[in-house]
């Protein structure tokens, strides 16, 4: 069992082959099939690639990730492999190209071992919206793993891969990381190319790693980040040496009062936050409460804007060119309607309808335009906080993982995103660190948010906080 | 339709032109942009709209749009963004078209058209924006299915929207001719309506002359030549007038032109129109254009037909007709401009180009790019005439045909080799005159008796004897003198 890339490297140094490491993961995946984390295991290509990397190791030409075994959220394109966004509408669809972020890992000799279950089209906070059944939390199989990157979080947490990739549109990496005791990073919007990530909401989506160590998260970011001619929204800003953690001098940290003292927050979560704040203060850092009086607007704004984009992004799944086509449709109009009605699950349909509504004639200004204005206000306010502070500290989730089928009302489910969606609306990088353990036995995370493209600071501080 | 009824009404027409840009690759991918490839050959994951793909901006399209905007005197937007126009259609793989909605790259501007009576009219340009083309649905190849060819999907387009300033189908014809000429001059579109690289939709309404409000607007599509746009508009004007004259009303609708029957047919009413749900394209950054970029593009712009026309008529003294012919295509104008680098005889250069050179092009059905004689050589020929070394007719009949096949020798050499250099020496010409007098005694006699009109015949004989080499001016004078002294 390899919990981290460091352990993989130790094994390689003591004579294990990459193939043996891959095989041990394959065995473990089989043993944990009941978690439903993997939608497909790429056994054959993983073994072939393992042999290839073993050759490279022998020749001394192996890349920086030789031996790292990675699972992909099922919304990332990997050439000649199936990808379905956990939706029936893409059943049988195989990608003809590889996502930029995935290619960069492969170029450093990481092994892609399979595709991981998630909420359909990354829409969900519990992984219960997958067309292929829910993922179960490995720490308590009655509980959800969070979502939408639930499969990624469980695969990493249960050591069914060394690390995994997820995508985060409103908290889809950080919330499951919090629920599974793993590290989950949502980089700055534009830090990692989105080329090859099946779009949910283009101006929010970011790919990020879910790992068992901070080091692995930093290393993966370092390798995936940077300019890409296939994504106009990716930044060409220099990629820093994130994985070399520097010691930090005393920092100015903001705590959002509305989050810390939010109604409905689990007392053990806020107690842990208080404890972290106390030790930070004790160590000489400035920690101050700041007011962010927009908490009530965050989730509605997110759902107006993200569903608007989603309604357009998901138009290409129409039964004409690829994916599911209804067998009971005559003519093009019926093909659209039936293919989409049969192919999309209820939550996806709900969001397409909501998004279509907010963009429709007569409602656009009341919803979409207003949503854009609120987003700008949130960005301005957040930028103002970062003028005075180095980092923002807040919980990742209000509570620990809940039980399967426990949250039935969509609106209640949407409120799961209350602490995470902020960073997506403003584009800031944020990480969930597994610092808390509830008396119910389940983990929960502490979230750190940094200024745009200041992942270096984010990692330095996270490293410091872990060792405090 | 009776002219008295027709003349009660006025047509109001606005045109939307879609011009496919002549870029090497598509608007948002590296796929090749070319006409006539095997179906579904110029495609990739991006053109196919596969999950996870993103648009990749082709910067050339911005340059082309700015060029056209500057040529039409438009304002170029400094800050703009792209938008998505959402609708479902099998040849639109993403389910939306990337276009510009609220912030078109060019606004304002105008086109000058020449009317028959020789007056000029200015047609306003409302806006020009960039967008991508859809693929092609082919309905008539397979009897059961519609086939889709995505080679065209993602090809960059410029949509040029005119003000409703056109008042007749003829004006629409002139307007489109001007637009086509311009995009060809700028090398941004080949302007080929038959291949669909330039397309036009017409918005047509009629109203009683003097009525303050516009009538109900009908949009007509599917016209694959400028002539057909004219035909469709003409048909539609009559149809609308007849409808109104018969007490009917018009409905806002989209109609399709049937070129075989020469009629328009209703396609859909406006009530059934899509809500396109335009919103800012989140996959492309807002576009910021600075003054420097515009100036750089401006500096690279070729001279435009209207500028050249004015120069030729005002500065060079050419007739409007000549100037129009010379500026009709950029390649002819370029040749003329190059010719003028080597000769200042504007009129002669124009005559050669519109006469012998045009005849050659017509005879072989080629463009001037395929004309074998370089401009500097043509200029040498003109200089030869101007220097009195050869006559225009000798140049045209003997030297020019030789130049077409002999690409090495200069016109002067050719003239010398063929012994065509004109004799303007009195001695030489006098010898020929003596010969003419000696061999035409009866005509000389009649001339002396007052038949002065025989001068022409004798002059012809003189040119014949001299094999055309005698300088006609000098020869004419000497002959007259010799005859008078007889």
Image (cartoon, coloured by chain):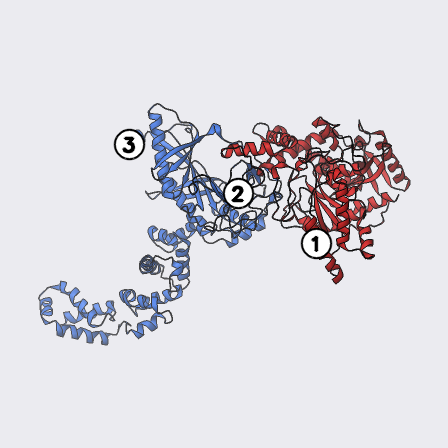
> Which numbered tag is attached to residue B131?
2
Subunit ID for the residue under disc 1: A
Vertical relation: B147 (above or below) A55 = above
Q: Please give the residue where the numbered disc 1 appears in the rendered image.
A: A49
Mark 3 vs mark 2: give the one in front: 2
Q: Please give the residue where the numbered disc 3 appears in the rendered image.
A: B3
Subunit ID for the residue under disc 3: B
In the picture, residue A141 is in which quadrant?
top right
Q: Position of residue A113 (x, y in %)?
A: 71, 47
Residue A113 visible somewhere in the drawing: yes
In the picture, residue B16 is in which quadrant?
top left
Q: Is residue A188 left or right of residue A91?
A: right
Q: Colour of chain A?
A: red
Classed neighbour count for the residue bearing mark 3: other residues with Cα under 10 Å, few (<14), some (14–19), many (≥20): few
Q: Is residue B54 left or right of residue A117?
A: left
Q: Position of residue B121 (x, y in %)?
A: 39, 41
Q: CA distance from mark 1 to mark 2?
A: 42 Å
Q: CA distance from mark 3 to mark 2?
A: 42 Å
Q: Nearer the viewer, residue B128 or A278?
A: A278
Mark 1 vs mark 2: give the one in front: 1
Q: Nearer the viewer, residue B102 or B297?
A: B102
Query: Which chain gets the blue colouring?
Result: B
């Amino acid at each position: 069992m390899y919990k981290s890339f460091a352990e993989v490297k130790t094994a390689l140094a003591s004579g294990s082959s990459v193939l043996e490491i891959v095989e041990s993961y394959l065995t473990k995946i089989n043993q944990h099939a009941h978690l439903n984390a993997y939608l497909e295991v790429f056994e054959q290509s993983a073994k072939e690639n393992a042999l290839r990397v073993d050759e490279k190791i022998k020749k001394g030409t192996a890349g920086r990730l030789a031996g790292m075994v990675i699972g992909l959220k099922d919304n990332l394109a990997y050439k000649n492999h199936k990808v379905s966004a956990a939706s029936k509408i893409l059943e049988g669809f195989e990608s003809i190209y590889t996502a930029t972020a995935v290619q960069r890992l492969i170029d450093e000799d990481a092994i892609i071992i399979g595709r991981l279950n998630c909420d359909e089209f990354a829409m969900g906070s519990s992984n219960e919206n997958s067309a292929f059944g829910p993922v179960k939390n490995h720490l308590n199989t009655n509980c959800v793993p969070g979502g939408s990157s639930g499969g990624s979080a469980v695969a990493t947490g249960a050591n069914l891969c060394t690390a995994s990739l997820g995508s985060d549109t409103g908290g889809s990496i950080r919330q499951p990381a919090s629920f599974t005791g793993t590290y989950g990073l949502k980089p700055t919007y534009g830090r990692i190319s989105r080329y090859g990530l099946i779009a949910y909401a283009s101006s929010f989506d970011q790919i990020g790693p879910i790992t068992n160590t901070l080091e692995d998260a930093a290393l993966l970011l370092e390798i995936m980040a940077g300019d890409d001619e296939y994504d106009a929204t990716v930044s060409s800003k220099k990629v820093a040496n994130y994985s070399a953690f520097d010691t930090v001098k005393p920092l100015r940290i903001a705590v959002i009062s509305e989050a810390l003292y939010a109604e409905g927050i689990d007392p053990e979560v806020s107690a842990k936050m208080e404890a972290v704040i106390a030790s930070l203060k004790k160590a000489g850092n400035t920690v101050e409460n700041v007011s962010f009086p927009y908490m009530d607007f965050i989730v509605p704004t997110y759902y107006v804007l993200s569903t608007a984009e989603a309604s357009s992004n998901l138009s290409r799944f129409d039964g004409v060119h690829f994916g599911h086509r209804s067998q009971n449709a005559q003519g093009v109009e019926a093909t659209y309607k039936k293919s989409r009605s049969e192919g999309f699950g209820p939550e996806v349909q709900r969001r397409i309808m909501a998004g279509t509504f907010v963009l429709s004639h007569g409602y656009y200004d009341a919803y979409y335009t207003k949503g854009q204005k609120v987003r700008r206000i949130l960005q301005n306010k957040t930028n103002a906080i970062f003028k005075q502070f180095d980092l923002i500290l807040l919980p990742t989730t209000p509570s620990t993982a809940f039980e399967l089928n426990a949250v039935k009302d969509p609106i209640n489910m949407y409120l799961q995103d209350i602490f995470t969606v902020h960073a997506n609306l403003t584009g800031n990088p944020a990480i969930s660190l597994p610092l808390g353990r509830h008396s119910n036995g389940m983990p929960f995370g502490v979230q750190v948010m940094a200024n745009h493209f200041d992942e270096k600071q984010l990692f330095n501080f996270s490293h410091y906080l872990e060792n405090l | 339709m009776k002219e008295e009824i027709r003349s009660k009404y006025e047509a109001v027409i606005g045109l939307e032109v879609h011009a496919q840009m002549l870029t090497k690759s598509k608007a948002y991918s590296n796929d090749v942009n070319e006409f006539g490839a095997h179906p579904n050959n110029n495609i990739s994951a991006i053109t196919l709209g596969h999950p996870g793909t993103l648009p990749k901006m082709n910067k050339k399209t911005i340059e082309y749009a700015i060029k056209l905007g500057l040529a039409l005197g438009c304002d170029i937007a400094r800050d703009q963004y792209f938008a998505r126009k959402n609708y479902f259609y099998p040849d639109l793989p993403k389910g939306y078209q990337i276009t510009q909605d609220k912030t078109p790259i060019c606004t304002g501007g105008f086109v000058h058209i020449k009317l028959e009576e020789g007056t000029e009219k200015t047609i306003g340009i409302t806006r020009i924006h960039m967008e991508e083309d859809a693929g092609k649905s082919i309905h008539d190849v397979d009897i059961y299915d519609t086939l889709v060819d995505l080679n065209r999907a993602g090809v960059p387009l410029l949509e040029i929207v005119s003000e409703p300033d056109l008042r007749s189908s003829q004006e629409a014809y002139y307007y489109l001719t001007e637009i086509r000429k311009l995009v060809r001059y700028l090398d941004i579109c080949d302007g080929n309506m038959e291949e669909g690289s330039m397309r036009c939709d017409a918005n047509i309404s009629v109203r009683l002359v003097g009525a303050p409000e516009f009538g109900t607007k009908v949009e007509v599509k599917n016209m694959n030549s400028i002539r057909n746009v004219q035909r469709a508009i003409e048909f539609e004007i009559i149809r609308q007038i007849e409808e109104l004259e018969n007490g009917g009303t018009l409905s806002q609708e989209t109609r399709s032109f049937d070129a075989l029957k020469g009629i328009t047919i209703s396609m859909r009413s406006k009530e059934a129109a899509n809500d396109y749900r335009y919103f800012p394209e989140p996959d492309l950054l807002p576009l910021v254009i600075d003054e420097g970029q515009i100036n750089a593009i401006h500096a690279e712009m070729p001279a435009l037909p209207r500028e050249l026309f004015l120069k030729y008529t005002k500065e060079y003294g050419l007739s409007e007709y000549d100037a129009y012919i010379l500026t009709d295509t950029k390649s002819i104008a370029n040749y003329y401009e190059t010719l003028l680098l080597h000769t200042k005889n504007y009129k002669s250069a124009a005559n050669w180009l519109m006469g012998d050179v045009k005849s050659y092009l017509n005879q072989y059905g080629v463009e001037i790019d395929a004309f074998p004689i370089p401009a500097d050589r043509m200029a040498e020929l003109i200089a030869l005439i101007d220097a009195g070394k050869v006559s225009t007719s000798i140049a045209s009949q003997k030297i020019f045909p030789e130049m077409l096949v002999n690409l090495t020798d200069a016109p002067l050499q050719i003239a010398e080799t063929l012994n065509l250099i004109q004799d303007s020496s009195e001695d030489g010409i006098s010898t020929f005159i003596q010969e003419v007098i000696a061999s035409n005694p009866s005509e000389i006699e009649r001339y002396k008796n007052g038949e002065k009109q025989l001068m022409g015949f004798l002059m012809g004989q003189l040119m014949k004897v001299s094999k055309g080499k005698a300088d006609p001016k000098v020869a004419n004078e000497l002959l007259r003198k010799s005859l008078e002294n007889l």
